[in-house]
Amino acid sequence: MFASLLQGSFIASIVFLQALIPPLKSQLPQTITVS
C-alpha cells in the first residue's frame, strides 16, 4: 500500500511540475541572458 501511495504522490508531483513549468519557461528569457 505504501508503494502505491508513494507512486501516486510521485505522479501528482510530476503533474504539478508540468503545470508549473510553462510560466517559468516564459519568464526565463527575460531574466537570463544567453551567453
Image (tube, grey):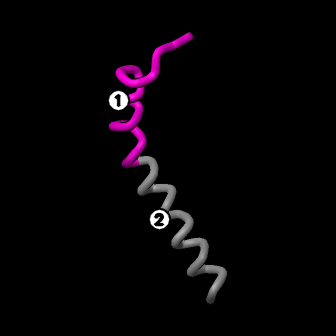
Q: Residue at x 52, y 71 (%)?
A: 9
Task: Tell me which amino acid carries mark 2.
Answer: Ala
Query: Where does the image place residue 19, in percent across and percent down from the top left?
Result: 37, 48
Height in image: 2 above or below 7? below
Quadrant housing the N terminus: bottom right
- The spot of residue 25 in percent (x, y) is 41, 31
> Label 1: which residue?
27
Of badges 1 and 2, the one in the foreground is 1
Q: Position of residue 21 (x, y in %)?
A: 42, 41
Label annotation for residue 4: none
Which residues, given as a range, are shown in magenta? Answer: 19-35
Residue 7 is situated, as x and y percent measured from the top left of the image, at 60, 72
Q: Is residue 32 above or below residue 23?
A: above
User: In the visual, does 10 lie left or right of 24?
Assistant: right
> 28 or 6, which is in the foreground?
28
Disc 1: CA contacts within 10 A as few (<14), some (14-19) or many (>=20):
few
The answer to which quarter of the image holds residue 29 is: top left
Look at 56% across and 10% down and name the residue there: 35
Q: Which residue is mark 2?
A: 12
- Please say if 29 is above or below 20: above
